[in-house]
Amino acid sequence: MTDTCRRLAFFLLLLASSCSNPPEPPRTVAALKSGTYEEASKIREAEPAVEKNQVLTDAPEPSEKMDPAKVPDVHYVPTPQDVVDMMLHLARVNKKDLVYDLGCGDGRIVVSAARNYGCRAVGFDIDPKRIKESLDNVRRNKVQDLVSIHQKDIFKLDLSRVDVVTLYLLPELNVRLIPQLEKLKPGSRIVSHAFDMEGVRPDLILTMWSAEDEEEHSIYMWTTPLVKDVARENYDEEN
């Protein structure tokens, strides 16, 4: 075989090898941001599952395994700190209380409860980014002995041991939580930033001005056992 034939055969061999094993395109943050939700979900599902099942906190209760395709029910908007302080004040939080924040965001409510009242507090969120922010906030404020953070679906939680529940969810999500909230022990307090709970009469509605964002905010509070809003039910039936 001549030198020319040998070079041609070698070149053909290399070409065949590269075609049979094409390089995999890199998975980048830009790909997730620019693609559709379905495309992003496919990329996440193909990633290694190490982070999905990692321990998120030193609390004795382990985080449940999350569906990688599950997305938050609401877009995260932080509650101004002065509104957080008023929510905890209205709920009459004390050192003996166990506080649950459902949809904890960056953890500011549970951190404030532990720091200002010395009580135990647990934050729940489904978004890994919010979980990381909450854990960082807990460490930064040195309240790890009182606060734990869990990546869990709030609609699957047992609330029977809880003294105070804080919410900043959409109205329909508050209503969806009613069966769980009805299992709270008598005398437990529920405080919601901005949104009511249709069909349940609040004990108190407070409107306040926040110096932080210079906006008006409403806070709703209920005490268990929950009282059905009979007047509203009758009005709905008549109309």
Image: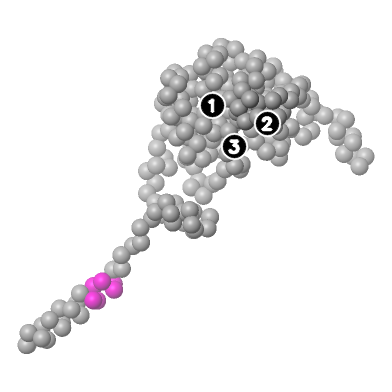
Mark 3 Cα-neighbour bin, 10 Å: few <14, some 14–19, many ≥20: few
Mark 1 Cα-neighbour bin, 10 Å: few <14, some 14–19, many ≥20: many
Which amino acid does the dot numbered 2 rest on?
Answer: Glu
Where disc 3 sits, the SS reads: loop
Label ID, residue 215? 2
Q: Is residue 55 left or right of residue 86?
A: left
Which amino acid does the dot numbered 3 rest on?
Answer: Val
Quadrant housing residue 51: top left
> In the rendered structure, does residue 113 fall within the stretch colored magenta?
no
Quadrant housing residue 108: top right
Q: CA distance from mark 3 to mark 1?
A: 12 Å
Residue extent of the magenta highlight: 15-20
Q: Where, quadrant-wise, is the N terminus in this rendering?
A: bottom left
Q: Where, quadrant-wise, is the C terminus in this rendering?
A: top right
Residue at the (71%, 37%) spot, across then down: 171
Q: Is residue 39 left or right of residue 48?
A: right
Q: CA distance from mark 1 to mark 2?
A: 19 Å
Residue at the (30%, 65%) spot, across then down: 23
